Structure formats: structure tokens, C-alpha cells
Amino acid sequence: MFNKILVANRGEIALRVIRAAREMGVKSVAVHSTADSDAMHVRMADESVCIGPPSSQQSYLSIPAIIAACEITGAEAIHPGYGFLSENAGFVQVIEDHGLTFIGPTAEHIRIMGDKITAKDTMKKLGVPCVPGSEGGVATLDEAKKLGAEIGYPVIIKATAGGGGKGMKVAQTAKDMERAFQTARAEGKSNFGNDEVYIEKYLTTPRHIEIQVFGDGKGRAVHLGERDCSLQRRHQKVFEEAPGPAISAEERARIGKVCADAMADISYIGAGTIEFLYENGEFYFIEMNTRLQVEHPVTEGIFGVDLVREQIRVASGLPMEFTQENLKINGHAIEVRLNAEKLPNFRPSPGRISQYHAPGGLGVRMDSALYDGYSIPPYYDSLIGKLIVHGRDRPEALARLGRALGELIIDGVDTTIPLFRALLEEEAVQTGAYNIHWLEHWLETNLGEA
Ligand code: MV4
């Protein structure tokens, strides 16, 4: 096991990693920008190193500064958290070149899954069901039109390097194809420097269901069921739950095994998430995330495992502590993302926290780096915490979420807390009868959001 690891992140996820390390007897090193000198992750870690000015580019994304911090402190491994450098294959390469260990997948796995055409081709060959569409990239408008007619409209054109909804355009009919094709290509080129696109059948009312997988890098892999993350706004998740309210035990076992077997085949190491669209009882692979995700705590809640501990274990060469047979679901978990944002437009709302009170009690987990008097800097993501509740079943989890939101106080900045209090009143939330479009429609109707 490592003696000391460096956490290349900030905020709640940095605390999450520091806490897991401490329970394992592993020392932690925080890195921070000058804007984060007073941040909780700096206080909670065993040591800290300032790695640059406020801009992420010059601090949390600076590979030389992070490697230097490892060398100064003697940290042997780096946990990237999510975002920042967590899916940067070049970073992993540099870490290995310096004789250090990346707590996550190999550079090769990150590279394969980072290119969506390659990811889809790989998964298809591994037996994972995919959305019907083009075989690989589509180079010309003529080819796109021919495929549109074959697949049947509506279709969606996606940039292979796309992300966050950028480089993705729907063609409702053949008449839309030229514009959709050219726009997707142009967005791929300008946002990601890659104009390669592919085409899929457009699913009109799916759910976003993602399967948590975990591998030991030696050909063994398990799945930890699904999360339903359909409640999103502009491709940002706001509410996630596990198990998915629409998924049966049989469906979970079937798709879970397909995913675990695929990860075993490629000797995947660490935590990963295989994203699907789910419509009319069918799963369609869309992409894979080769990192620990923001919403991992709902999976931890229902399985009673510590995914970060397991990541650190397998990175150090130890076996996973779980097997598929002893992974059993217990109850239901829900996470809401607390953002420092002002409704109705979700404008970032940085500033000083004048009062903070975290909820507690049975089945309540608050992952946050906030404290009384802390000033949220304006330079980073507006996620300031995650409230995760666990109950014996979904109704109990919902009631507990309402109770916990009642106890939670975050004063001094605007937050998305009122949104969750309102959403809990909605029948579709109470019954789980939502899809990927439900929240956007609700926001339009109830907040008059454009
Ligand atoms: C789709 C789709 C419908 N059909 N692909 C959005 C982001 C990217 N990760 C994939 N996305 C979608 N791909 C096909 N073939 C609809 C979406 C989509 C979506 C997916 C998950 C959660 C929220 C979404 C909101 C809008 C569109």
C-alpha cells in the first residue's frame, strides 16, 4: 500500500479522497491554487502545496506543477478526482514516466473511451448493445444523407470528441441533415479540434441509465448496478438515484453482467461508468466515463462499499475487496447536487457563506467542503456540496431527503436548494416517472426558464 498520495483536485471530492486515504492509514497531500489557500481540502490533508494562481489552467490543470508537488512531498500516487485531469491520457503517461502511479485506468483505456467512435466500436465488439447508427465515422454529407434514410429519421449527429452536449445535433427529417451535419462537424472542430462525426438513431424519450463498473486490472471485474441520472439541465445532472426506479432485478443482472464481462475482457482497472440510454425496456450504450463520478455516493449507499478505498487498493496492486456474489443491494439512495447558483437562470453565485448547517441523522450523508465563513471563489465549478440520503426503500429515501433539506442551511449565497424542495412535491419525482427531458420542461413551466 502507498505511504502517501497526492490529491489533484479541490472541493468536496478532494475531501472524499483524503478521508478514504486516512481510513487506510495513507497520508495525503493537497494541492491548491492561491485562491484556495483557506479551502477545507488544504486544512484536512496531512500536507499541502500551492501549485499556482487562481486560473485552473495554471493550477489544477498544470501537469508540471502537480508532478513537482509529488516530488517535493514524496507522494507515490495521484488521485485525480473528477473533472480537471481525471480523463487526460497524457497526464497518466507523464505520471508513469516519473515512476509514479495514477489512481485510475490506464492511458490506453482513457484514450479508447475518450474517442466516442472508438469507444462504441470497442463496446460493440465486446457484446455491449449500442444505439443503431453508422459504423464508425461519417465523412461526407452524401454518406450522412444515405445513412439517415437507412436508419430512419429522426437521427442525431455526434462529434466523436464531443462532450457536455457540444457537437451534437438532431436532424428531425432529411431536410435538416445538411445543417445538422455541418454544425456538428463545426462544433467538434472548434470545441475539440476534431471534426469527425458519427450518426445514431435519435431516441426521443429515453432515460439516462449508467452502470457502475470496477476492475482489478488483472482480468476480474464487477458491476455495482445502475444509477438513473435522467434529471439533468443543459447536460448537468442535478438529481441521481440508485437503483433506477424503472429497472428490474433481471434487467440489472443482465446488463450488469454484459458490462462486467466487457471490462474483464479489456482488463479495466478501477472505477468506470458505462452510460446507456434506456427506452422501451432496451439499453443502448452511448459512452463510457473512465473516472469516479460525482454521483458515486448513491452506489456506495446501496452497496455499502467505499469506491475510493477500492480505487486506491487496486492502484497499489491489491485485490478488490468485493466479488459479484457478495455485492447485494440494500435499499435506495438519492443524491442532489447543491450548486451556488441563482434561480431561475442558474447564474453562478460565489461569495461568503455567512451560515452553514449540515443535516444529519440516520441515512444522511453530506459531502461538502463548506464551512462557516468560507468564501466560494468565482474561478471554479459551482458545485458546493452533495446531499445523499439512504432509505430502506424509495419512499423512505424521498421522505428523508425532504427532512434533510429542511435541516440544511446555506446562507450568504444563492443555491439550488429551493429547486429540490419544489421538485420533491412533483408527482413524477415521487413516482420516478421521468425521462431525460422532464426537468427541462418542468423548469420552463415552473421557473419560466428560457
Ligand atoms: C442521445 C440522445 C438521443 N438519442 N443519443 C446527450 C449528451 C451525450 N452524453 C448524449 N446525449 C444524448 N444522446 C441518441 N442516439 C439524447 C441525448 C440527450 C441526453 C442524454 C442523457 C441525459 C440528458 C440528455 C439530454 C438531452 C439529450
Image (cartoon, helix red, strand yellow):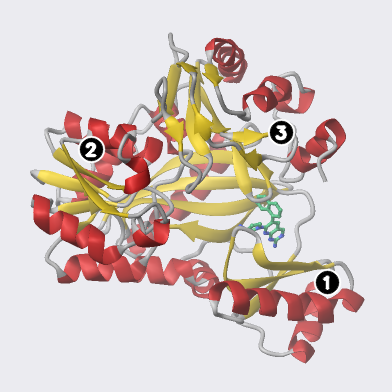
Q: Nearer the viewer, residue 123 or 171?
A: 171
The picture quadrant for ligand 1 comes to bottom right
As helix, strand or loop, the secondary structure at mark 2 comes to: loop
Instruction: Indicate left or right for 125 with 89 as reference.
Output: right
The CA span between labels 3 and 1 is 39 Å
Does mark 2 have its CB less than 8 Å from ligand 1? no
Q: Nearer the viewer, residue 207 or 370?
A: 370
Earlier-in-chain disc, 3 versus 1: 1
Instruction: Report whether residue 341 is seen.
Output: yes
Earlier-in-chain disc, 3 versus 2: 2
The CA span between labels 2 and 1 is 47 Å
Quadrant of the frame with the N terminus: top left
User: In this figure, which residue is indicated by the disc labeled 1?
Assistant: 152
Query: Which residue type carries mark 2?
Result: Glu
* Mark 1 nearby-residue class (10 Å; few <14, some 14–19, many ≥20): some
As helix, strand or loop, the secondary structure at mark 1 comes to: loop
Q: Which mark is residue 321?
A: 2
Mark whose residue sits in front, 3 or 2: 3
Query: Which residue type carries mark 1?
Result: Gly
User: In this figure, which residue is indicated by the disc labeled 3?
Assistant: 343
Query: Which residue type carries mark 3?
Result: Leu
Q: Which mark is residue 45?
A: none
